[in-house]
Amino acid sequence: MKALFIGGTGTISQGVAVRAREAGWDVWLLNRGNRQDRVVSGVTSLKGDINADEAGVAALIKDMHFDVVVDFIAFVPEQLERDVRLFTGKTGQFIFISSASAYQKPLNHYRITESTPLVNPLWEYSRNKIACEEFLMDQYRTKGFPVTIVRPSHTYDDRYLPVAIHGKKGSWQVVDRILKDKPVLVHGDGTSLWTLTHSSDFAKAFVALLGNPLALGETFHITSDESLSWNQIYDSLGSALGKTVHKYHVATDFLAACDPEYSGTLLGDKAHTVVFDNTKIKRILPDFTTSVSFAEGARRCVRYLLDNEQSQIPDPDFDAFCERIIQVQEAARSAYFASITR
């Protein structure tokens, strides 16, 4: 069985490539070839920029047919329109990686199934994923395009430490603040529940969908069954580092007002309690369980960061942002108490 992964070297897709190879799939990657250190042994690589050179990619795959094509790097409907042009008649199944952030915000019910409405007025990224899903399902219904949709939720690997609030240069500055006993920003009171899934666990279930006729025309989310509060998540990071995390709680609305980027990533996603019902994917793979707890995942991530200096990227802008937020909130607290003691 032959699968083409568009991308194939990312947080999710590399884990899937490893698992697919272990399951005996003939895996091909289509990407720009910029991340050779992330290419899984035994795969075949096609070098091409699908976003910039559709004609070149069409020439590359002219005489090829795949049992499955997976697009890991599509974010807007125009990219899926291109995929339909390229792969109609060339694959028995096309899998689109959507996002669980597309689910209704705010939620009517904390427990999420695949039938939970898709509507997120707070994050353009999520709205684009919804539009992608709608386009592909229309192609399935009207033209028989063999689509399967998968919605991950905050999937990470050993190289990517998942935190809620960080700067543009990644998570290292959060780790640095913990190591230096500086306060770490946590949105709200830190008690909302969140689900973190290691990419190796995600890959177990995902590979069961490859070439599976029961998955055609269907949508699945694949997540861990472990739900933790953000306070617990940060405490797990502290435990992995051998440090106590000095959590500094800040209202999510205030964070989003100070930096509009958090309107999407917090108000439109991580500030909401989410618990996923994985019954549907377990009907496809009845023995599916996740084996990497976040306590273990945090230890792996921390070990990688501490062992690889190139991943320790300072982010003075984010550090200054944290200090300003704390200073302003503390000043407001002092001003309030001063006002009631006059």
Image (spheres, rainbow, N blue to C red):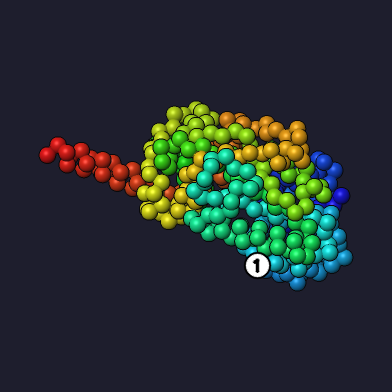
Q: Name the residue at 65% across, 32% down.
A: 292
Q: Nearer the viewer, residue 38 or 79?
A: 79
Residue 1 vs 307, above or below: the answer is: below
The answer to whether residue 341 is left or right of residue 182 is: left
Disc 1 marks a residue whose amino acid type is Glu
**Element type at mark 1:** helix
Q: Position of residue 337 (x, y in %)?
A: 20, 38
Q: Quadrant of the C terminus?
A: top left
Residue 89 placement, left or right of 242? right
**Residue 204 seen from this side:** no
Q: Quadrant of residue 61?
A: bottom right
Decide: is 59 above or below 311. below
Residue extending furthest toward the left: 342
Q: Position of residue 181 (x, y in %)?
A: 40, 33
What is the count of numbered marks?
1
11 or 222: nearer the viewer: 222
Which residue is situated farthest in the bottom direction here?
Answer: 55
Q: How crowded is mark 1: few (under 14 residues within 10 Å), some or many (20 or more)?
A: some
Q: In this view, does 138 lie above or below 241?
A: below
For the question of whether residue 25 can be seen, the reply is yes
Query: For mark 1, what is the residue?
Result: 78
Residue located at (77% from left, 49% from top): 215
Provide residue 173's location: percent of width, then percent of height.
47, 43
- Residue at 61 percent across and 61 percent down: it is 131
Percent x, y of residue 307:
59, 37
User: Could you say which quadrant of the image residue 53 lies in?
Assistant: bottom right
